[in-house]
């Protein structure tokens, strides 16, 4: 079955997420069950960010800082260009979409980059994998602080901005476990590296729990009656526009600033990604439970789009890397000159 899904380019994890949405629609958590689920979700989020802290090495952080030109471009794309574009798209969508979906589009633009897929696509495209590792790690490290701060500045959580309670929850569920994980890294870092399946199970299991919790709350609150096929189609189009602009901008900036092709690959794939693994738990903390399901819908759609588009782009980069560049080209007058190697 997995082989069939791979041939059809269907991400089985996305199917699992869709399955949790379907279960939430049929059997949403209510009453005492919801209270127990909330406790489990909070614990899973704390464990998730603890493992993030334990897995990101300080050596990788310092190595990334030394390649400051590349890191600066990815950082500016992730936390400056993306939010500006998201703000503009949200303004255009206001009046045409439910406010929850508009907030969701803006929230997508505030998130850090992914780690696994950024590195995987950079490797497939024969790019600078160490730089991609540093970019993605630093982006997630910074996102733990920057994303909630940006959300405080530009988003309305529950109609009146983020409350002090929400800030406290972020500190307890995200920052504190992450810091503890960093301190615990010398003790458990190598152990975790040898147990990738365990960390993957926690990563993916936490996200599935958050999806079920968010969509259960949405079903109980009756928010899905506000999502029409037209609004869903518009969200897909706006997500694609956002992704296309950033892919074009990172490619153009990399070439304008004369990065090597290997560095360009890392910049394009790290700068264009948004992390669902970080975004869903953060949304669960930042926004009211009844609104989370609607707000994270643009993120879930964007996540699948970025995987499909970047998979095709990585194959194109890889093919170009296989084709030997001609050593010489001819001018219009026929005089040979050396080809510019990017």
Image (cartoon, helix red, strand yellow):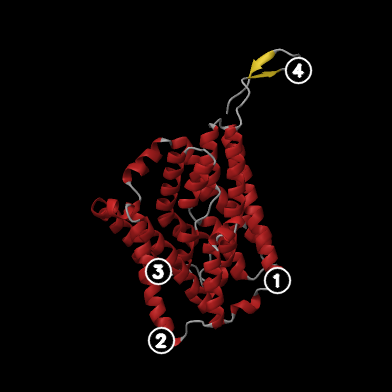
- Secondary structure under tag 3 reads helix
Residue on which the image places disc 1? 229
Residue 332 marker: 4
Question: Closer to the camera: disc 3 or disc 1?
Answer: 1
Residue 51 placement (x, y as % from top left):
34, 58
Does 293 sit left or right of 57 as displayed? right
Residues packed near mark 2 inside 10 Å, few (<14), some (14 to 19) or many (20 plus): few
Question: Among all residues in the image, which is located at the extreme top?
Answer: 335
Residue on which the image places disc 2? 32
For image coordinates 43% across by 44% down, the residue present is: 133
Q: Earlier in the sequence, mark 2 or mark 3?
A: 2
* Contact flag, marks 3 and 1 (Cβ < 8 Å): no
- Secondary structure under tag 4 reads loop
Residue on which the image places disc 3? 164
- Number of numbered discs on residues: 4
Q: Alpha-carbon distance for marks 1 and 2?
A: 33 Å
For image coordinates 40% across by 63% down, the residue present is: 201
Residue 164 placement (x, y as % from top left):
40, 69
């Amino acid at each position: 079955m997995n082989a069939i899904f791979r041939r059809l380019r269907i991400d089985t994890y996305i199917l699992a997420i869709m399955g949790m949405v379907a279960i939430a629609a049929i059997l949403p958590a209510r009453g005492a069950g919801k209270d127990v689920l909330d406790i489990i979700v909070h614990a899973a989020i704390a464990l998730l960010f603890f493992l993030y802290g334990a897995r990101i090495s300080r050596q990788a952080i310092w190595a990334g800082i030394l390649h400051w030109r590349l890191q600066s471009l990815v950082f500016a794309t992730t936390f400056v260009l993306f939010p500006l574009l998201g703000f503009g798209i949200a303004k255009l969508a206001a009046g045409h979409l439910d406010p929850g979906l508009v907030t969701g589009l803006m929230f997508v633009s505030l998130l850090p980059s992914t780690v696994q897929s950024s590195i995987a696509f950079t490797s497939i495209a024969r790019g600078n994998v160490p730089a991609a590792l540093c970019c993605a790690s630093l982006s997630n490290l910074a996102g733990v602080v920057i994303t909630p701060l940006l959300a405080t500045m530009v988003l309305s959580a529950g109609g009146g901005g983020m409350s002090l309670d929400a800030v406290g929850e972020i500190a307890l569920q995200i920052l504190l476990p992450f810091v503890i994980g960093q301190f615990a890294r010398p003790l458990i870092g190598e152990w975790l590296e040898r147990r990738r399946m365990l960390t993957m199970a926690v990563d993916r299991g936490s996200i599935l729990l958050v999806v079920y919790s968010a969509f259960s709350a949405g079903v109980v609150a009756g928010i899905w009656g506000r999502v029409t096929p037209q609004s869903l189609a518009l969200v897909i189009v706006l997500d694609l526009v956002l992704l296309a602009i950033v892919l074009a901008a990172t490619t153009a900036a990399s070439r304008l600033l004369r990065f090597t092709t290997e560095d360009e690959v890392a910049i394009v794939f790290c700068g264009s990604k948004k992390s669902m693994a970080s975004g869903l738990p953060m949304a669960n903390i930042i926004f009211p439970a009844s609104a989370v399901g609607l707000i994270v819908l643009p993120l879930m759609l964007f996540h699948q789009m970025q995987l499909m588009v970047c998979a095709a782009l990585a194959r194109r980069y890889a093919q170009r890397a296989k084709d030997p560049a001609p050593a010489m080209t001819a001018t219009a007058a026929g005089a040979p000159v050396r080809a510019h190697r990017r």
